[in-house]
């Protein structure tokens, strides 16, 4: 079922099929199989199962097409227009502006950047505004740069615009209704527990516990990314597992074994309480793909353990992915979705092979962290290189220090913060624990060679994904296939490096008044620009892809006429 849905999503997203003829053909095949099943009684399950797969394929094609159309907007203009918008979330401060997510007419959404001004009154969720701006879908600087416009599209936004000073008028306020706005208000109350904390510790706690990474500054993001601890700030299976363990301990009365507790009705009650609590936490943290996947998997595991204790975990993983894609087919292209499922599949596949029954509990716990880290790193390696062009070299050392701190100190202390009498002391302890984690992550970042920048083209990334998939399969032949793919991968790297050394290229980048001219010959380059910071930043991915180091790049200021 999942394969049929993914096939339809991919073919529709990349526009490889004509939607109407495919839907018509699928409907014809579906009806024929449905009728054929009435005559072939011995093969009825197979025939009707095939009909169900055809239906899922056609449904995913239609569903993906509709999702893409919701992100398209015919009123995008190259000249400034006046739009009536409603603010959906609190503004997020940037270096020179405030980022605001708003709703346009026809239930379209966009991202606006309000230029900083001493007279600017920041809007709040629910405010109605008239803004004068140009809403466009940003284009990447080149084929190697991050495609911010496509990112917005996958998030359900039609584009972004900059609102200059004086281009904003308040027209009223209308409270947002629905489940998510109510959860946003609850999150604001929870964030009040962090009042008085240092800005760095507060932003890290909001990201770690509530999945809100809007207030993380660039230095903190860089430290966690370089040290390999960014997964801690993405609310995912780690957090769900810790919270589920605490809830199990509570609903089982401290793991006491009573005769009445072993009855089926009590086990049903326990599973229901756990599932409802985790669903509430998932909605509270914004229903990100990682938390949705984790909660769905836990619910399926809980139900499966009651119905069939020895069910396959791969079915639970596939079922959770199926439900997420059923709700949002474009989630398949989110980096968090791909990273989380790759990590889980690798852990489920390889971790049982790496279990060591150590007599010393401390050494056994240390090895568990190392084993899980290695499995997750293997599964996510291709996607990490593809999306972030970076590999953390000390990820095991990072997890050895960060994971126990999060599991045994940070999250339990957070749940004690609202408790009377204990709350003030727990709040101070929570801030100090977060400070320790931040300092540890910063220390890892400062180690020599903490991370390596790697860029692979599309074909090399696909080969690397195929190699990891071969390792996850079973059977002796997979080693031959993996070996052949590895040889092909190495040959591809050598060819790409040789081509980069022999190429010459000249490129021009423009953004407003900022202009960058880059001339490259082999592994050396020359930059001409009126802004050195922008010049090195906009050409970073291209230079990384063509093996040009910053030390081999010469900068010359471009004099304006």
Image (cartoon, rainbow, N blue to C red):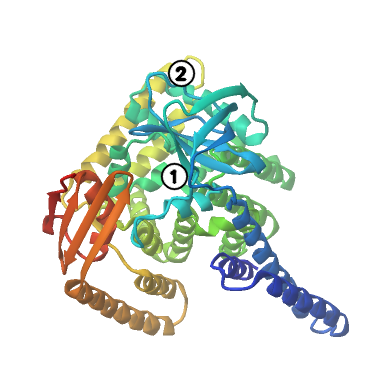
Q: Is residue 381 visible?
A: yes
Quadrant in the picture for the C terminus: top left
Give how far apart the Cα atoms at labels 1 and 2 are: 28 Å
Residue located 55% across and 52% down the image: 293
| Residue, disc 2 | 422
Structural crowding at the residue carrying mark 2, measured as other residues with C-alpha within 10 Å and reported as few (<14), some (14–19) or many (≥20): few
The foreground one among 471 and 247 is 471
User: Residue 428: percent from the left, percent from the top?
Assistant: 37, 21
**Label pair 1/2, CB-CB below 8 angstroms:** no
Structural crowding at the residue carrying mark 1, measured as other residues with C-alpha within 10 Å and reported as few (<14), some (14–19) or many (≥20): many
Q: Secondary structure at mark 1?
A: loop
Side of 169 where 536 appears, left or right: left
Q: Is residue 417 visible?
A: no
Q: Which mark is residue 234?
A: 1
Relative to 228, residue 440 above or below: above
Disc 1 or 2, which lies upstream in sequence? 1
User: Residue 339: percent from the left, percent from the top?
Assistant: 44, 57
Relative to 283, residue 538 above or below: below
Query: Given this view, does label 1 or label 2 mark the residue nearer the observer?
Result: 1
Q: How many circles with numbers are drawn on the protein?
A: 2
The foreground one among 161 and 482 is 161
User: Residue 173: percent from the left, percent from the top?
Assistant: 62, 23
The foreground one among 451 and 30 is 30
User: Residue 414: percent from the left, percent from the top?
Assistant: 45, 29
Q: Secondary structure at mark 2?
A: loop
Which residue ends up furthest to the right in the rendered image?
39
């Amino acid at each position: 079922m999942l394969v049929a849905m993914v096939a339809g999503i991919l073919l529709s997203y990349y526009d490889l099929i004509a939607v109407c003829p495919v839907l018509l053909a699928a409907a014809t095949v579906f009806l024929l199989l449905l009728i054929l099943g009435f005559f072939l009684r011995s093969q009825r399950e197979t025939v009707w199962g095939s009909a169900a797969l055809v239906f899922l394929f056609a449904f995913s094609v239609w569903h993906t097409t509709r999702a893409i159309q919701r992100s398209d907007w015919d009123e995008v203009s190259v000249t400034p227009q006046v739009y009536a918008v409603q603010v959906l979330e609190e503004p997020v401060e940037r270096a020179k502006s405030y980022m605001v997510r708003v709703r346009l007419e026809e239930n379209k959404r966009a991202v606006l950047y309000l230029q900083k001004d001493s007279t600017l009154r920041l809007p709040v969720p629910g405010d109605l505004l008239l803004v004068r701006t140009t809403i466009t879908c940003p284009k990447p600087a080149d084929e190697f740069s991050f495609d911010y416009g496509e990112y917005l599209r996958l998030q359900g936004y039609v584009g972004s615009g900059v609102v200059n000073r004086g281009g904003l008028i308040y027209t009223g306020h209308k409270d947002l209704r629905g489940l998510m706005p109510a959860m946003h208000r609850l999150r604001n109350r929870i964030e009040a527990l962090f009042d008085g904390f240092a800005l760095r510790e507060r932003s890290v706690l909001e990201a770690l516990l509530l999945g809100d990474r809007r207030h993380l500054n660039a230095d903190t993001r860089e430290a966690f990314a370089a040290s390999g601890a960014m997964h801690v700030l993405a609310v995912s299976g780690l957090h769900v597992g810790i919270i589920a363990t605490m809830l199990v301990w509570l609903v089982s009365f401290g793991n006491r074994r009573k005769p009445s507790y072993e009855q089926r009705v009590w086990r049903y009650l326990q599973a229901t309480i756990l599932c409802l609590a985790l669903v509430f936490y998932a909605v509270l943290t914004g229903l990100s793909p990682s938390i949705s996947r984790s909660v769905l998997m836990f619910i399926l595991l809980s139900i499966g353990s009651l119905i069939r204790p020895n069910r396959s975990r791969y079915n639970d993983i596939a079922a959770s992915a199926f439900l997420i894609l059923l709700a949002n087919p474009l989630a398949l292209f989110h980096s968090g979705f791909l990273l989380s499922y790759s990590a889980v599949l690798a852990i489920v596949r390889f971790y049982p092979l790496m279990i060591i029954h150590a007599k010393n509990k401390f050494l056994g716990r240390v090895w568990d962290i190392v084993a899980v880290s290695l499995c997750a790193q293997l599964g996510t390696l291709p996607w990490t290189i593809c999306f972030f062009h970076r590999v953390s070299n000390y990820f095991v050392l990072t997890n050895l220090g960060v994971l126990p701190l999060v599991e045994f100190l940070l999250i339990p202390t957070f749940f004690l913060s609202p408790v009377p009498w204990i709350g003030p002391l727990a709040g101070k302890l929570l801030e100090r624990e977060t400070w320790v984690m931040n300092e540890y992550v910063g220390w890892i970042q400062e180690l020599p060679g903490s991370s390596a920048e790697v860029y692979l083209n599309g074909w090399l990334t696909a080969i690397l994904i195929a190699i990891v998939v071969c390792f996850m399969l079973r059977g002796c032949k997979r080693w031959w296939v993996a070996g052949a793919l590895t040889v092909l991968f190495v040959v591809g790297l050598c060819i790409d490096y040789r081509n980069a050394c022999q190429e010459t290229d000249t490129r021009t980048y423009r953004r407003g008044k900022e202009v960058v001219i880059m001339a490259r010959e082999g592994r050396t380059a020359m930059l001409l620009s009126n802004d050195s910071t922008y010049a090195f930043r906009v050409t970073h991915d291209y230079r990384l892809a063509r093996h040009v180091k910053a030390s081999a790049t010469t900068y010359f200021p471009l004099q304006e006429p």
